[in-house]
Amino acid sequence: MENRLTENKMGVMPMWRLMLDMGVPIMISMLVQALYNVVDGMFVSRISEHAFTAISVAFPMQNLLIAFAVGLGVGMNALLSRALGAGDPEKVRAAALNGLMLEALSYLLFLAVGLTLVEPYMRAQTDVEEIVQYGIVYLRIVLIFSVGIFGEISFERLLQSTGRARYSMYTQLSGALFNIVFDPILIFGLLGFPKLGIAGAAYATVGGQIFGSLIGLYLCLKKNPEVPLSFRGFKPNKLILGELLKISIPSIVMSSVSSVMTFGMDIILNGFSSTAVAVFGAYFKLQSFVIMPVIGLTNAIVPIIAFNYGANKPERIRSAIKFGMLYASILTVSGFILLQTIPHKLLLIFDAKEYMMQIGIPALRIISTHYLIAGVSITISCVCQAFGYSVYSLFISCLRQLVALLPAAYLLSLTGRLDLIWLSFPIAELVSISVSLPMLRRVLRKTGMAKT
C-alpha cells in the first residue's frame, strides 16, 4: 500500500496538467449540478412566479444543509489526503469512518429541522401566503429526505481525496441527470406519473441525491482501495474527530455564511417587491454556472496541497496556487462576459415577465462585475482550508458576504433605489481581495511553504 501512496499522481504529475486532470471532472459534475439547479427553477417558474419565489426563499435553508455536508466533506478530504501523503494507512481509514459518522449525525439534525421548523422559517421571510405554502411543501421534502446529499457528497470527497476525481464526477452526474429527467415528469405528471407540482421538483431533487449516493458508495467500495470502508471494529476516535472538526467547522460556517447573506438579502429586497426576490433567486441559480465550476476546480487544490504538504513539496504547492488562480479567473471572467452580453436571454429561462426583465437586466450586469476578481479570492479560501487554516477561509467569506455585503446592501436600500443595492457585490469583493492576499502570504510563511 505504501508504494501506491508514494506514487500517487498528486506528487508527481506536472501541476498545470494535474489541476486540469483532477479539476475538470469535478468542474463537469458541478456544471451538471448547476444545470439541474437551473432546470429546477425553469420548470417551477412555469407553475407561477410565486412558486419560483418560494424555492428562492427556501434556498438559504437548503444551502445550509449543503454547507454541513460539504464542510464535513472538506475536513474529511483534507485530513485523508494529508494521511495519504504521509503514508499513514491507519489514519486514512480513521479519517474516512469518523467523517462518515459525522455526516450521518448531521442528517439527523436536518431531519429534525424538516419536521419542526420549516413553517416558521418561511413565514419569517414573506407574508404572501401562496409563497409560504409552496415553500413549506418544497423545503419539508428536501430536508426530511436529505440523507442522499450527505451520502453523495461524502463518497465524492473520498474519491477526490485519492485523486479519483473522474469517479467523483460519475457520482454527481448520475444524481444530476436523475433530477433533470424526473423534474418535468413529476412536476407536470408526464408518462403516467401523478402531477405533483412543486412537490415533484422536491422529490426529483432528493431522488437524484439518493441515486448519486448509491453510485458513489459502489465506486468507493469497488474502485477506491486506499480507503477501506469496513466498520468492523470501528470506534469513534476523539483525536481524529477533533482534527476533522477543526477543519470542518470553519468550513461549515463559511459555507453557511451565504445562507445568512441570502436570507438577509431576501428580507431587504422584499421591502421593494416579491419580484425583486425572484430576480435575486434567478441570479443565484445563474451564478451557479460560474461559481460552481470555480469551486469544483479549486476543490481539486485541497487534496493536491494537502498531499504535497504531507510530502513536504513546497514548489508543487506554490505551483498549485498559481494555476488555481489562473484557471479560476478564466472561468469568472467568462461568466462576467456572459452576464454582460445576454442577461435578457438568461432571464427568459425563468419565464421572466416585463417587470422582472426591467429590474433583472441591470441587476445581472451590475452584480457580475465582481466576477473580475472573485476567482482569486475563492482560490485563496481553498488554499487556507487545505493547510488547515480554515479560520482564515471563514474570515474571508464573512468579510465578503456579511461584514461588507449585507451592510452595504442595507445602506444602499435606504436610498429607495433598487438598482443601487446590486453595487454591494463588487464593493464586498474589493474589500475581500484587499484582505485575502496578505492572508495568503501569512499562511505560506507560517507553514514554511513560502518562497525563500
Image (cartoon, rainbow, N blue to C red):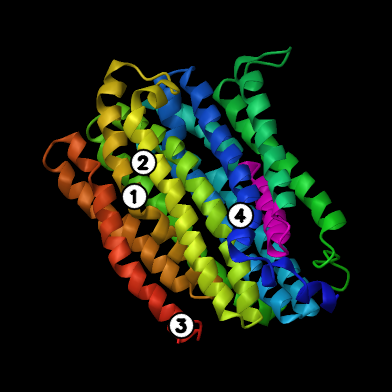
Residue topped by disc 1: 372
Q: x%, y% of residue 425? A: 29, 48
- Counting residues from the N terminus, which is met first, the one under dot 2 or under dot 3? 2
Give the Cα separation between the discs numbered 1 and 2: 7 Å
Location of mark 3 (residue): 451
- The secondary element bearing badge 1 is classed as helix
- Of tags 2 and 3, the one toward the viewer is 3
Q: CA distance from mark 1 to mark 4?
A: 21 Å
Kindly identify the residue that appears in the image at 36 percent across and 38 percent down. Answer: 337
Q: Which residue is mark 2?
A: 336
Label 2 environment density (alpha carbons within 10 Å; few <14, some 14–19, many ≥20): many
**Closer-to-camera residue (37/276):** 37
The disc labelled 2 sits on which kind of residue? Phe
Residue type for callout 4: Leu
Badge 3 amino acid: Lys
Give the residue drawn at x 36%, y 41%: 336
Contact, mark 1 vs mark 3 (Cβ under 8 Å): no
**Which numbered disc, 1 or 4, marks the residue closer to the eye?**
4
Gap in angstroms between the C-alphas marked 4 and 3: 24 Å
Rendered position, 356 above or below 318: above
Where residue 194 sits in the image (x, y, percent)? Answer: 68, 16
Residue that badge 4 annotates:
20
Query: CB of mark 1 within 8 Å of CB of mark 2?
Result: yes
SS of the residue under disc 3: loop
How much space separates mark 1 and mark 3, taking CA atoms?
Answer: 27 Å
Report if residue 153 lies within the magenta region.
yes
Q: Quadrant of the C terminus?
A: bottom left
